[in-house]
Amino acid sequence: MVYQNLYFCRKKETPLYICEKNVARLMSGNKTLRRTALLLTAMAVLAVLVPTALAADAAVDADTGLPAFLSDGAGNDSLELLTFFLFFVGYISMGAAFVFFMSERNNVAPEYRTTMTISALIVGIAAFHYYYMRGVYVDTQVVSTEYRYMDWIITVPLMALKFPSLVGKDAITDKTFAGLGFTGICFVGAIIMIGFGYLGEANLMDETIALLLGGMGWAMIMVATGLPFGLFGGLGVDDSKIKEEVKWSTDALRTFILVGWIIYPLGYLFNENTYDLGSEEVMGVLYNIADMINKIGFGVVAWMGAKKATAAMA
């Protein structure tokens, strides 16, 4: 259609600027059409997955349509229902975020498309893991530690690596620590944080030592990226070289790492293999809320910065 429009423009000797307007309008329409088709496809997939997931449950209450253990009168039904609900909302919202980030990938400047790809990978991987964690919880009434850490060992390093992809290579300094540059410190810090967290929650080492060592990994990331709103620029980042349009998003990502990630140690306290401060459902609720805030929110603020910078370039 675009090429036909160019052909008829030339044949009728239409002024060039009118041809360009027509082509731009057609290309914009095609992009909107592709985006709509992608969203409709995702909605259709979710419409198939949701009833299939519910039908696969071992026992369903005939009156409520919920898994039977949520209606049998045993245990803390309201907390169990909240845990189930958040697992369910988790994989639906992560899946929707995946579609959104992928559909927006081509609407930002080429230098920010890696950021959008990483954002989509994070929520896409999490959506699959949440689907399985929901299934494990329905079948066994246990909040799975193994599936949780399978997700985190992939997605948390990706979250740490999204920061340099947003601020740009010019803003990353040449400073190194133990032979590691900015990206290496972020990646290794994420592995340390998740690795020791699992060792503590799986009861493979002392829970307090594991918590402290895992905190060192988190501290490595914070020292490299810095604190929000000019409190500390970060050893690996030169704030003066960050584009003005993405500074707000940069500080928002730092805030997520500083404040949003604190929810995870709180959940750690409730695991029956660590400090066992209460029901493991409390742990599940805290982890689920933290994941949805950090994974989806992390991607949204990066997208906002990328869109703003793209508009400034135009």
Image: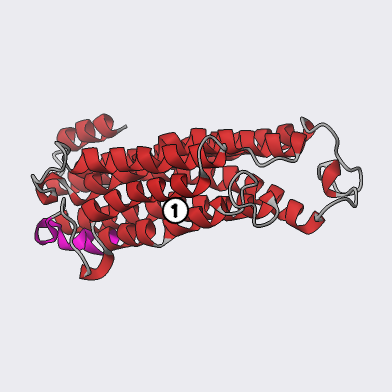
Residue at (64% x, 46% y) in the render: 87
Whole-percent x, y for residue 32 in the image: 40, 44
Q: Secondary structure at mark 1?
A: helix
- Give the position of the C terminus as an image quadrant: bottom left
The amino acid at mark 1 is: Asn
Residue 239 magenta: yes
Residue 212 magenta: no
- Give the position of the N terminus as an image quadrant: top left
Along the viewing direction, whichever of 4 and 66 lies nearer the viewer = 66
- Answer left or right for 284 relative to 314: right
Name which quarter of the figure residue 178 lies in.
Answer: top left
Whole-percent x, y for residue 254 in the image: 31, 59
Residue at (55% x, 38% y) in the render: 148
Along the viewing direction, whichever of 306 and 8 lies nearer the viewer = 306
Residue at (43% x, 55% y) in the render: 261
- Which contiguous range is marked in magenta? 238-249
